[in-house]
Amino acid sequence: MVQYVPAHLDASFAALSDATRRGVLERLGRADASITDLAERFHMTLTGMKKHVGVLERAGFVTTEKAGRVRTCRLGPRRLEEETAWIEGYRQLWAARFDDLDDVVRELTRKEKLHGRKK
């Protein structure tokens, strides 16, 4: 089940791999916020937060709008459908493999009870 993974999935998973960026998304899920507000909330510099927001923006998770000196961040258009579908494909693959393994264990257990355990 090896599939070609589009580049935007790479950008999505890279963006989501960082706890601060996941926290920013969670925060923006409640309300829009300025980069200054986010930097204060996560105890980091403006430059550091701008870099995190840039990664989220390139992945399509966040949009920004500048009004004067304030850059406001809000959730972007991405809804994680493709990422969810990709993960679900692998979840189904692993579930099938574990089901097969369960069958093997049940058969071995049945044979062991039937013939006794060999030492």
Image (cartoon, grey):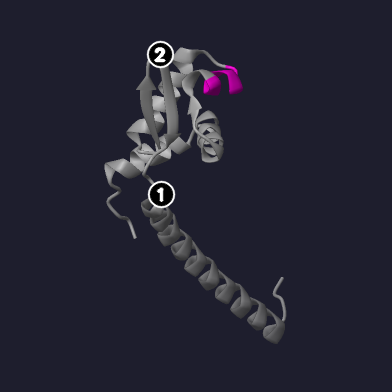
Most frequent secondary structure within the magenta stretch: helix
Q: Is residue 40 magenta?
A: yes
Q: Residues within 10 Å of mark 1 (few under 14, many from 20)?
A: few
Residue 75, position as x, y percentages in the image: 44, 38
Q: Residue at x 58, y 72 (%)?
A: 102
The N terminus - image quarter:
bottom left
Q: Residue furthest front?
A: 68
Q: Earlier in the sequence, mark 1 or mark 2?
A: 2
Please give the range of residues in magenta: 37-43
**104 lies left or right of 66:** right
**58 lies left or right of 35:** left
Amino acid type, label 2: Arg
Q: Residues within 10 Å of mark 2 (few under 14, many from 20)?
A: few
Disc 1/disc 2 C-alpha distance (Å): 29 Å
| Figure quadrant of residue 20 | top right
Between 107 and 88, the one lying in front of the other is 88
Which numbered disc covers residue 79?
A: 1
Give above or below for 77 relative to 93: above
Instruction: Give the label, 1 or 2, closer to the camera.
Output: 2
Q: Residue at x 38, y 28 (%)?
A: 64
Q: Residue beneath label 2, please? A: 69
Between 89 and 119, the one lying in front of the other is 89
